[in-house]
Image (cartoon, rainbow, N blue to C red):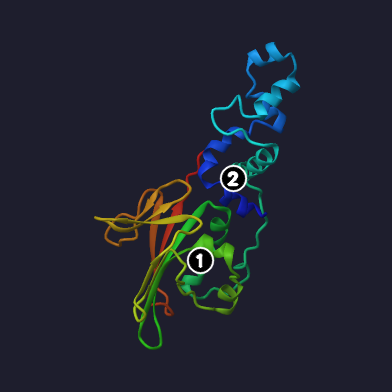
Amino acid sequence: MTMAEKKNEYPAGVEADRRLLPFETWEDYLDSLIEIADLRNLRSIKSSRTIAALGYRALGDTLSEKKFYARRAVINEIVYPTVRPYVLVSEGADVEDPFNRELAVRERANRVGILQTIVFIRHFTKGGFEISGYIDYAHRLGSENWTPFFKSNKMLWPRDNDLGYYHWRHGTVRSNISRNYKPVMDPDRGLLFQNRHDHKIICPDPEQDPGQNTSKLRIFSPRYTQVEIYDHVVRRKS
């Protein structure tokens, strides 16, 4: 089972599983459940652990040894993520297009999680049909090869699995949860995006303030009908 699959296995218990971090071993975890009366009556730490393992000393379910180590590994990776190497694919690229240049400037910050940029793009196909959408830049950086974009001038198009997607000809309108954002429909403000790390709200309405720790930039590119970038500085809890 991969680490990503393990994270999905216990989505509702992430906060509760933080209590497992202080325990290096399953035995340490069982010891935390033992009551003084157990030691007094049983006169054995081994027997007391057996009572705890059977579930007589916990308000909820007592974790088996296998589940303890599996869940502790998941929460440890979430709270103390492994630093993974990355390559800046925009390094050395000839970024003449203003849009490519702005994304290249933001690549490192999005890869390390300091910045989580939302990109709005509006295109027209050769047939004159509009395709537009909101892209979680950091999400797409980690899930596809950007070398053709930065070094071969491949154009960036919204996809139907991006944060937001609209295809005029097909009548397709979709919104999706990404790695860093969750779409939220507000009756007054319209479509909003909530950051999944610091829970701040990003408002893409050009007539409204983009939100706390968020700045907005309109980019004029000869290859794109409309491009707007929303840069959100992530405030992680220490």
Q: In the image, what residue type sits under mark 1?
A: Leu
State the CA–CA distance, disc 2 to disc 1: 27 Å
Q: How dense is the environment of label 1, judged by Cα within 10 Å: few (below 14), some, or many (20 and up)?
A: some
Q: Position of residue 223 (x, y in %)?
A: 44, 80
Number of residues whose C-alpha sits closer than 10 Å to that of mark 2, classed few (under 14), some (14–19) or many (20 or more): some
- Secondary structure beneath dot 1 equals helix
Q: Nearer the viewer, residue 200 or 95?
A: 200
Assign a secondary structure to mark 2. helix
The quarter of the displayed image where residue 77 is located:
top right
Question: For this view, does 143 lie left or right of residue 187?
Answer: right
Q: Is residue 75 above or below residue 52?
A: below
Q: Are the two marked residues, 2 and 1, in contact with CB atoms closer than 8 angstroms? A: no
> Which badge, 2 or 1, comes first in the chain's sequence?
2
The circle on residue 103 is: 1
Q: Is residue 220 above or below residue 163?
A: below
Q: Residue furthest left?
A: 188
Q: Which residue is mark 2?
A: 78
Residue 149 visible: yes
Instruction: Name the amino acid type tagged 2.
Output: Ile
Task: Please state which of residues 159 and 141 is positioned toward the viewer in this rendering.
Answer: 159
The relative height of residue 23 versus residue 132 in the rendered view (above or below) is above
In the picture, residue 207 is in which quadrant?
A: bottom left
Identity of the residue drawn at 69% across and 12% down: 41
